[in-house]
Image (cartoon, helix red, strand yellow):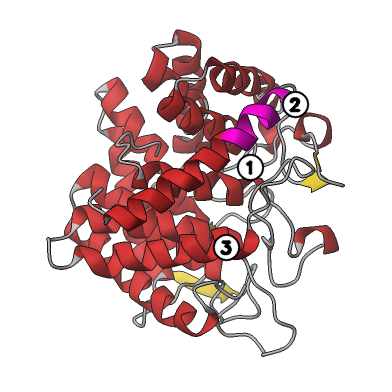
């Protein structure tokens, strides 16, 4: 990643702080899969909900740190979290399309880094579960269970890289066809002409046509949930990287331009919803961190004279996060604060540390240090 010397020093300084803090926390939380913190201490989703969609991020964080530092403590914690997550496979009926989030950056990365055969099987199992959710008539992957037969959420774009991997691993293009068909459907049904994004769309299971849209985790129908924007930015550029289809890069850029315009007036920290009332003021740092990762990848995919648009925006976001919302103290297990699950959510899910905020912040800094392994 070609950045200025000044920015390089800043990135390396942040990485040093990450390593200093996490090499302690990784041992302290070794037998957990965290989601948030309670009184500064990581909670444990192994005890709360082993099928929770975020349960791969902790292992993914540890692999990011290991890949750069080669500190074995990170590797041990990552492997242990991966084994703990095996319990989710035993509750098949409660699993969902988020198996990509859960296993692609945990066991999937383990296999790609170490060749661990058990990790490969875990990841293939997850890929087959995701592929089994494909609706061939509607050309989409069903997001949830129960009566939500035709519901598709924008988050799904971050799960389908698992299928691109499986296509290559199995030398079987059926996985890629499913992923591309789904991406094409999401592009048609979720991305608005102005670059804003629908969070949830109900599709007709027989033909994939739109029935209605829902506000989802945003303020209302037609609003603009910021993390949904970041899922689209990163998800579509990932599909471009895996397929080379220009329309996916164009979609990622369109959403990115909208996102950058929306955060320019808020010091590069996104509101939870870009189309919500002025009060209460709700922000979501996790949306910022995820978007930064996507913007960095867009910068890697465009021409020389276009890169700075995306890279500079990513740097401004990350610097704002580090300056205002990172906790480097020993009294708090998490790093990035002020994440918000949804516009309307539990009190504990508003302006709180959330594990994927830490993950994406670390991944963005990891990328800026010149690391080239793509975790997705």
Residue receiving disc 1: 54
Q: Nearer the viewer, residue 130 or 66?
A: 66
Q: CA distance from mark 2 to mark 3?
A: 26 Å
Residue 25 magenta: yes
Tag on residue 28?
A: 2
What residue sits 66% from the left and 47% below the top? 328
Q: CA distance from mark 3 to mark 1?
A: 26 Å
Name the element at disc 1.
loop
Q: CA distance from mark 2 to mark 1?
A: 20 Å
Q: Quadrant of residue 258?
A: bottom left
Q: Is residue 169 left or right of residue 280?
A: left
What residue sits 57% from the left and 72% below the top? 225
Q: Is residue 327 above or below residue 82?
A: below
Q: Quadrant of residue 40?
A: top right
x and y, in percent, of residue 367 in the image: 36, 44
Residue 346 in sight in this render: yes
How many residues crowd around disc 2 within 10 Å: few (fewer than 14), some, or many (20 or more)?
some
What residue sits 59% from the left and 16% below the top? 76
Name the element at disc 3.
helix
Q: Quadrant of residue 80?
A: top right
Q: Is residue 162 left or right of residue 273?
A: left
Q: Main secondary structure of the magenta part?
A: helix
Q: Nearer the viewer, residue 66 or 151?
A: 66
Q: Is residue 310 left or right of residue 331?
A: left
Tag on residue 341?
A: none
The earlier-in-sequence mark between 2 and 3 is 2
x and y, in percent, of residue 81 in the image: 64, 23
Q: What are the residue bounds of the magenta stretch?
A: 20-29
Contact (CB < 8 A) between labels 2 and 3? no
Residue receiving disc 3: 323
């Amino acid at each position: 990643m070609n950045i200025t010397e000044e920015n390089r020093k800043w990135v390396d300084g942040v990485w040093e702080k990450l390593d200093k803090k996490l090499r302690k926390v990784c041992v302290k939380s070794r037998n957990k899969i965290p989601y948030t913190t309670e009184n500064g201490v990581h909670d444990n989703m192994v005890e709360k909900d082993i099928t929770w969609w975020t349960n791969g991020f902790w292992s993914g964080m540890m692999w990011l740190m290991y890949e750069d530092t080669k500190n074995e403590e990170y590797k041990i914690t990552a492997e242990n979290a991966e084994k703990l997550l095996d319990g989710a496979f035993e509750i098949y009926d409660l699993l969902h399309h988020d198996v990509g989030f859960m296993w692609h950056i945990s066991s999937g990365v383990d296999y790609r880094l170490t060749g661990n055969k058990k990790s490969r099987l875990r990841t293939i199992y997850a890929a087959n579960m995701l592929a089994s959710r494909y609706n061939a008539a509607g050309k989409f992957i069903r997001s949830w269970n129960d009566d939500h037969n035709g519901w598709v959420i924008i988050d799904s774009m971050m799960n389908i890289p698992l299928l691109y991997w499986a296509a290559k691993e199995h030398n079987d293009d059926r996985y890629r066809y499913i992923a591309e068909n789904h991406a094409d459907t999401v592009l048609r049904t979720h991305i608005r002409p102005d670059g804003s994004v629908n969070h949830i769309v109900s599709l007709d299971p027989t033909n994939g046509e739109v029935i209605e849209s829902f506000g989802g985790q945003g303020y209302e129908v037609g609003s603009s949930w910021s993390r949904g924007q970041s899922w689209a930015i990163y998800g579509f550029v990932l599909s471009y990287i895996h397929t080379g289809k220009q329309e996916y890069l164009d979609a990622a850029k369109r959403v990115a331009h909208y996102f950058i315009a929306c955060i320019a007036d808020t010091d590069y920290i996104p509101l939870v919803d870009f189309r919500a009332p002025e009060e209460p003021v709700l922000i979501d740092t996790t949306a910022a961190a995820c978007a930064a990762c996507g913007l960095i990848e867009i910068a890697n995919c465009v021409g020389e004279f276009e890169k700075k648009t995306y890279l500079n925006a990513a740097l401004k976001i990350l610097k704002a996060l580090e300056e205002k919302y990172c906790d480097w103290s020993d009294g708090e297990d998490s790093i990035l604060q002020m994440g918000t699950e949804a516009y309307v959510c539990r009190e504990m899910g508003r302006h709180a540390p959330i594990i994927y905020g830490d993950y994406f912040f670390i991944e963005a800094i990891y990328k800026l240090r010149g690391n080239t392994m793509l975790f997705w």
